[in-house]
């Protein structure tokens, strides 16, 4: 078991040891129960309708970019099966991954052409919006289409 050292410092002063507080003679008014605390009529923190419309347009374009990348990934994964049919072995894998990266950079160029008015802090959303889904759906559609295309090439059963 661990042994603990005893404290050698002086004890902390209690509330009765501190200096007496000066009492205020000014009474503070109590909040009336009839007024609403959450009254938002004078709240400047709320967005104006114009800001909400801009935010809505930005979110709509980011959503379009996301779904464009999803569709691009599925189509490109299937097309990759047929484009790189003549390449064998390890080269086919690297050619497909290179093709995936090139198409992703092309989608970044298209995203910049969409003229999204993003704040400086959100500029990276052009690159990061849907990147994980893009990669995994590209690989998934490539593997599934390749498997379905070459289903009859392998003998049925376990090769021993």
Image (spheres, rainbow, N blue to C red):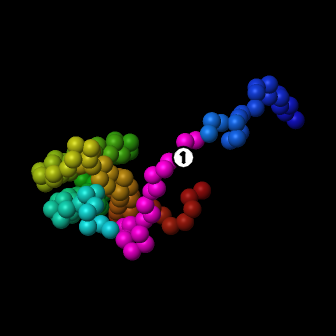
Prevailing SS of the magenta stretch? loop
The magenta segment? 21-38
Which sits in the foreground, 122 or 110?
A: 122
**Number of marks drawn:** 1
Q: Quadrant of the C terminus?
A: bottom right
Q: x, y (%) of residue 138? A: 33, 56
Picture residue at 29% right of the left edge, 53% below the top: 129
Q: x, y (%) of residue 143? A: 39, 58
**Extreme-top residue of the structure:** 8
Instruction: Decide whether residue 26 is among the magenta residues.
Output: yes
**Extreme-front residue of the structure:** 25
Picture residue at 45% right of the left edge, 56% below the top: 28
Res 45 → quadrant? bottom left
Q: Residues within 10 Å of mark 1 (few under 14, many from 20)?
A: few
Instruction: Decide whether residue 116 is among the magenta residues.
Output: no
Residue 121: tell me if it is visible: yes
- 21 vs 13, left or right, is left
Q: x, y (%) of residue 9? A: 76, 26
Which sits in the foreground, 111 or 60?
A: 60
Q: Quadrant of the N terminus?
A: top right
- 144 vs 19, left or right, is left
Q: x, y (%) of residue 133? A: 35, 57
Picture residue at 63% right of the left edge, 36% below the top: 19
Residue 147: tell me if it is visible: no
Which sits in the foreground, 154 or 72?
A: 72
Asked if residue 58 is positioned above or below residue 90 in the image, the reply reads: below
**Extreme-right residue of the structure:** 1
Picture residue at 31% right of the left edge, 55% below the top: 130
Q: What residue is pinned by disc 1?
A: 23
> At numbered mark 1, what does the secondary structure look like: helix, strand or loop?
loop
- 60 vs 129, left or right, is left
């Amino acid at each position: 078991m661990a042994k603990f050292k005893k404290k050698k410092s002086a004890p902390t002063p209690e509330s009765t040891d501190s200096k007496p507080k000066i009492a205020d003679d000014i009474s503070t008014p109590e909040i009336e129960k009839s007024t609403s605390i959450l009254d938002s009529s004078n709240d400047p923190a709320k967005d104006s309708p114009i800001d909400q419309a801009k935010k809505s347009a930005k979110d709509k374009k980011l959503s379009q970019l996301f779904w464009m990348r999803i569709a691009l990934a599925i189509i490109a994964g299937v097309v990759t099966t047929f484009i790189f049919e003549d390449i064998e072995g390890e080269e086919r894998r690297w050619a497909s991954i290179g093709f995936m990266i090139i198409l992703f950079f092309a989608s970044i160029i298209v995203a910049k052409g969409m003229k999204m008015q993003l704040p400086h802090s959100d500029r990276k959303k052009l690159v990061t919006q849907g990147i994980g889904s893009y990669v995994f759906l590209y690989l998934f559609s490539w593997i599934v289409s390749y498997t379905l295309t070459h289903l009859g090439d392998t003998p049925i059963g376990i090769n021993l």
